[in-house]
Each structure stands twice: as structure tokens, then as C-alpha cells.
Amino acid sequence: MEELQIEIGMILQDCNTQIRYRIIFVREGTIILCRMDCSKLGIIPYSLQEVKGLLLNNDWNITPPDGSCVVDYESFSGKLRETFETKRAIVHQVAYRFGPTYLGLFSEKARPQIAEICENIGISRATFWKSVRLYLQGGLDTNALLDRRWTHAKNNFEYTAKTGRPAQYGAASTLIITPEIKSQFDDGIENYQSGRSQSLRSAYNYVMMKYYSVENDTEQGIAVSLLPITERPSFRQFSYYVHNTLTKKDMDIIKTSRREYRNDKRLLLSDSLNGVFGPGDCVEIDEHEADISLVSSVNHKDVIGRPILYFMIDVYTRAIVAFYVSLENNSTLGLTNCLLNLSDDKAKLCQCYGIEIAENAWIPSFLPNRIRCDRGAEYRGK
């Protein structure tokens, strides 16, 4: 019995249920366990004699703590460091107020203290309980608070050979992507972002000409040539880096603009037919300046301006039900004449311009229930 060593951080496992527990406190015949492999914090007190009996009867088994890794916290940067420092501040406060048994976490008196910790650090209760659970399940090891994705971070691994599939035809680049090459690629990304006319290929050529070219004196003058393909990054390496640096949203904004992206890529919760019950129920009206200039019929050298086209469209059928052409922009008179055109006989109207159509070829006059428009001055009363 004396040879049985029970220490903080060791793992106890129930042989029947396979449930694992982490030892977080051992003193004066009492042992405190924290259940592992679950998303809810569970702290269970046991007597030391009871646990030893379970171990001697082989109902439970005990394993040493997990091998702790050495982490250079100073190497953290940005969001990773900020998140880790926040979680570490949480467990330090919890250890000071509720340690070493941590049983007081579940008492009524703990609620105001937990609320105070959350308010002082600026976190939610969910973040508080998750940080405490990871800390206790990890055997009071702050490394358990680390984002697990950190161990898979690409920047923490130094390659000794070029990655990626081998070349299928002839020679290929043998360069390993280093921080220096990444900074060159970042310069290429800035060139790619300089305008929507730029392409990945043109940005790659920019990097090659700036960083991987040499100048040679010839009889004709100075000639610029690229380094051999084995001594410069490949286009595939550059393209891979760009797509891992820029998101799809960034790429779309580069190729259009932020305004176009907001208009064309935003989440649409409905459409124009929402609340429209059939033809003639709702119409939309607006005006547009035509992309032509009119000249005087008396003197063709005199430009009189651009015509303003007023259109009324039935929302349900998308059909043009009325129109009017005027030289007055944002005019109540132009809007009124467009409304009057809605009541005109379209067959007779077309005959005035030498066009013959059947009476049922155009939607007949009707009175719409609603009219949609923008907030132009011609639509608002004073």
C-alpha cells in the first residue's frame, strides 16, 4: 500500500465505464477528481482510502500525467497571445479564490465572485467555465488553455525540402518558402491589390522581375533576364500562398470593389415579389437619364440636353406599363405624365408612331394598389 503513489495530475480510469478522472487535489485523506473527456465541468470528492481500495481491486487503474511540453509563450503574437493571456488571467483568479479544492465553484456564494471575474476581465460566462474546465481537466496545467490549432500552425514547422508534388515535365523550382520569400510574395499581393486589371500571373511576373532577375550588359545595351527556374519560386507556390493569405471575400473585392461586393454578395432575405399578390397589385416607378444627347430640330449644332426617361414597371410581371420622355429631371410634371400614360390606350399610342400592335399585346390600363419609389424630391410632398 505504501508503494502506491497518488499525485496531482495523474489520471484515474474506471475499468467498467472507461470514464477518466484527473486528480486535482490530494491531502489529509481526501482526493478531488475532475471528470475528463466531457464538455461540462464535474468535480467529485473521494476519500483517499476509497480510491486506494478501488485501485487494489482493479476496479480502477492509474496512469502518470501526460508528458508536458515546453512552450515558449513569448513566441506568441497577435490574437493567439491575447486569447491565452485572457484564459490564464481567468484561472489565476479562480485558483486564488476557489483553490486548491475548487469545490466552492458550485456554491451559491460563488455566483457574485464569478460575475465579478467575468466583468473585470471582460469575458462571458461560457468562456469562464470553458477555461476553468480545460485547466482542471488538464491537471492544473496552463498549457491546456492553448488553442489546439496552435500545434498545427504552419509557421511553427521548418521544412528541409520543397513541398508539393514533383514536376511532371523537366526542371522545377527547388526553393523552400522562407520568411524572406513570404515578404516578397506579400509585395506581389500588394501589386495584385493595386487594381482589378491585375491578375495572379501579372503579380507573379512582377515578383520575378523585381527579386529574381539579373541585368546583363550586351552590345545592344542592358538586358534583363530571369534566374533559372530552379532558383526562383514557381507560380504554383505563389498562387498557393496568395489563396492562403487572402480570403474569397478579399479576392472578390479586389476584382470588383467594396461597394459592388456589398450590393452583389450581401445576404438577401427576400425578393421584390414579397407581399405582391398578382399583376397590377404593385408597380415601381423611377427615371433615368439617357446616354444620348438631343439636338435642336431647327439647328442640329445646338445641343439641348439629355432626355429623361420615366418608366413604370409592374412588379409581378416585370412588364413596362407606362413611360414618359421629358427634359425635366426630378420633375413632378414628368412623374404626373408617366402616371397619365398608364391610362392611355397603348395600341393607339403606337399608331401615332407608325407601329401596329394588337390590343392585347400590351397590358391595358389599370389602377395599381401600390406604387414603389425612391426618396426623390418629385415623390415627396413639401
Image (cartoon, grey):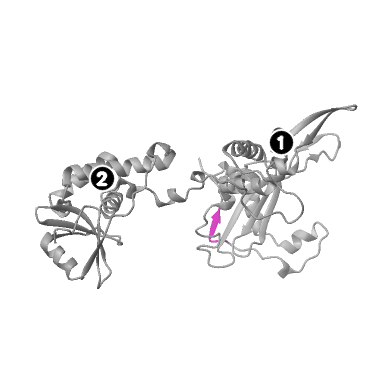
Q: Residue furthest bottom?
A: 16
- Measuring 12% from the left and 64% from the top, which residue is drawn there? 50
Q: Which residue, as the protein is rendered here, is positioned at the far front?
A: 3
**Magenta stretch in the rendered image:** 368-372
Q: Where in the figure is residue 88, as x and y percent of width and height?
A: 30, 42
Residue 197 in view of the camera: no
Against 131, residue 212 (above or below) is above
Compared with 131, 76 (above or below) is above
Q: Is residue 177 left or right of residue 114?
A: right
Residue 91: assigned label: 2
Q: Is residue 191 left or right of residue 29?
A: right
Does residue 309 belong to the magenta stretch? Answer: no
Q: Is residue 324 left or right of residue 315?
A: right
Residue density around tag 2, few if under 14, some if 14–19, many if 20 or more, within 10 Å: many
Question: Mark 2 falls on what kind of element?
Answer: helix
Tell me which amino acid carries mark 2: Val
Residue 291: percent from left, percent from top:
74, 44
Q: Residues within 10 Å of mark 1 (few under 14, many from 20)?
A: some
Which residue occupies the foreground of this view, 278 or 146?
A: 146
Who's the residue at 21% across and 47% down the image? 114
Tag shown at residue 7: none
Horizontal and vertical percent for residue 166?
Answer: 68, 55
State the mark number for residue 212.
1
Q: Is residue 371 magenta?
A: yes
Disc with the residue nearer the chain's start (2 vs 1): 2
- Measure the alpha-carbon separation of dots 2 and 1: 51 Å
For image coordinates 62% across by 42% down, the residue present is: 330
Main SS, magenta region, reads strand
